[in-house]
Amino acid sequence: MSLVDFVPTPKFEEYKARFQQHYKLERRADGVILAQAHTQGGPIQLSVENHRSVGQLFKTIGADPENEVMIFTGSGNDFMMDADPAGFKLEEEDLQHWAYEYAYKDGRINVSSLVNDLEIPTIGVLNGPGFHTEICLMCDITIAAEDAIIFDLHYDIGSVPGDGIHSCFLELLGVKRGAYALLTGQAIDAKKALEYGLINEIVPREKLLDRAWQLADHIMTQPRTTRRLTTQIVRRPWKQRIANDLDGGFGIQMFAHLAKKKAVHSKSHIASQIAYVKQGKENNIK
C-alpha cells in the first residue's frame, strides 16, 4: 500500500453549493452534468466575478472523475445580453491590476479550460442571443434556439477582439467570414449560423434541454475510455488554434486595453451595442 493517499477530488454536492451564485448544477446518476449559467436566476450579466467563474467551473468539473458529459447553457431567453451594473467597478478602480487578472489571465483560462481541462464530451446549448458565445460554440456539439443571434461587440465598443472569440470565429467561419464578423459586428441569426457551421442544430426553445439530454444519451452508449479519447481527437483543431492564437490575441487586446487608459467593458459601452443588435437592423443581419 502506498505511503500516501490520493489528494481528494472535488465532490459534486460541495461544488454545486460553491458555484450556486453563478451556475445551477444538476447531475444524473450516469454522470451527465448540466451547468446553467445565470445571474440571480436570470440571464447572465457579465462582470469581473462572473468572468472568473467560467474557468473555475470547467477546471472543477474536469477534476471530478464522476462527470462523464457536460451540457453548458445560459438561463432565460438570452445567453448574455447585458452587463452587471457594477460588474466592472474593480477594473475601473485599478485597471492595471484587473486588466491582467480579469481580462488576460481569467480570459485565457476560460477558453483553454474548456478545451484542455474537460476530458469529457461537451454540449453547448445557446439558449438565445448573446455575446461571449464562444463558450457554447467551442463545445464539441452546439445546438441553438431559433432566436439565437451570434455576434461580437468588441470592435464596436473600441476594443480589440482578441479574447477567444477571434479564435472561435476564425476557426469556424474561416478567414474572410471571420474577419467580416469581427470588424462589422455582424449579427448572425440561427439559420445563418447553421449554414456557416457555427452550430449543429436549431431546436425550439422549449425542447433545447430535452435535445441536449438526448445527445448526451447517445454519447453515453459507448465505453468511458472511448468517450474520453474521442474528445482528444475532435478537439485537436481547437488545441492547435489555442496554442497558435490565444495568448497572442489576448496580449494584443490588453495592449489596446491599457493604451486607452479606461475600462472598455463598461455597462454603457456594452449597452449601446446590445441595443443595436436587439433592434435587428437589416443592414447588420446578414
Image: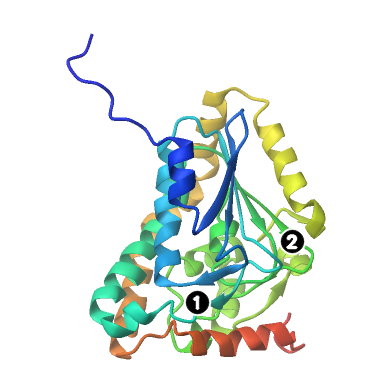
Q: Quadrant location of residue 212? A: top right
Q: Which residue is mark 1?
A: 84
Q: Residue at x 43, y 76 (%)?
A: 87
At a point 70% along the width and 66% down the height, the residue shown is 128
Residue at the extreme left: 3
Q: Is residue 133 visible?
A: yes
The kind of residue tagged 1 is: Asp
Query: Depth check: 68 or 164 in front?
Result: 68
Amino acid type indicated by mark 2: Leu
Confirm whether residue 239 shows in the render: no
The tag on residue 194 is 2
Quadrant for the N terminus in the image: top left
Residue 121, x across and y down, in percent: 57, 40
**In what quadrant of the picture does the C terminus appear?**
bottom right
Q: Quadrant of residue 263?
A: bottom left
Q: Residue at x 77, y 88 (%)?
A: 282
Q: Is residue 227 left or right of residue 257?
A: right
Sequence-first disc among 1 and 2: 1
